Image (cartoon, rainbow, N blue to C red):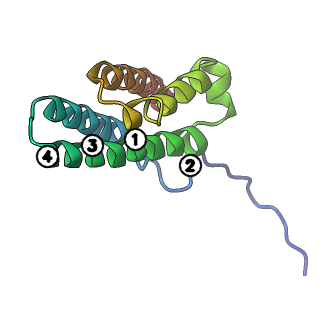
């Protein structure tokens, strides 16, 4: 039995469109920033320990959401059109990692992370218009 190619198809994502959204990473990054602010606003050692634990967990979630966008949503044509995209993702995931929000309580680092996510989001929404 021979198979005949009827139509060639391609998709830019693993699931139907609408699954990917940088808002997921941003929500978690906002949570990271809030944990840092609450950490600095408390004198309770137990509360501070819980804030650190949640902040680190959420920082990992930020990285995971960014990695999914980076590796699953964005394709070679996007990287060609937006050559800064790989650098933005690299910087953002590092800002969510041990050298960034995961390993720090500096609110300014959380703000930097949010800024990178906003830059990625701008490009993401531009690609959805195409």
Disc 1, disc 4: CB below 8 Å? Answer: no
Mark 2 or 4: in front is 4
Question: Considering the numbered disc 4 on the image, is that residue within a helix, a strand or a loop?
Answer: helix
Q: Earlier in the sequence, mark 3 or mark 2?
A: 2
Label 1 to label 4, Cα distance in Å? 22 Å
Mark 2 or 1: in front is 1
Q: Which residue is drawn at 38% across and 41% down?
A: 59
Q: Earlier in the sequence, mark 1 or mark 3?
A: 3
Q: What residue is shown with label 4? A: 47
From the viewer's perspective, is residue 40 above or below residue 14? above
Name the disc covering residue 62, or none: 1
From the viewer's perspective, is residue 8 above or below residue 12? below
Q: Earlier in the sequence, mark 3 or mark 4?
A: 4
Q: Residue at x 25, y 31 (%)?
A: 33
Label 3 to label 4, Cα distance in Å? 9 Å
Q: What residue is shown with label 2? A: 13
Name the disc covering residue 52, or none: 3
């Amino acid at each position: 039995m021979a198979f005949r190619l009827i139509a060639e198809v391609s998709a830019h994502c693993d699931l139907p469109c609408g699954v990917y959204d940088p808002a997921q990473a941003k929500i978690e990054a906002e949570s990271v920033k809030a944990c840092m602010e609450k950490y600095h606003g408390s004198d309770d050692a137990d509360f501070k320990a819980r804030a650190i634990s949640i902040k680190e967990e959420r920082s990992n979630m930020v990285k995971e959401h960014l990695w999914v966008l980076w590796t699953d949503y964005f394709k070679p044509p996007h990287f060609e059109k937006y050559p800064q995209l790989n650098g933005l993702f690299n910087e953002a995931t590092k800002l969510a990692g041990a050298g960034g929000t995961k390993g720090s309580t500096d609110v300014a680092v959380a703000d930097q992370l949010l800024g990178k996510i906003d830059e990625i989001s701008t490009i993401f929404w531009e690609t959805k218009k195409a």
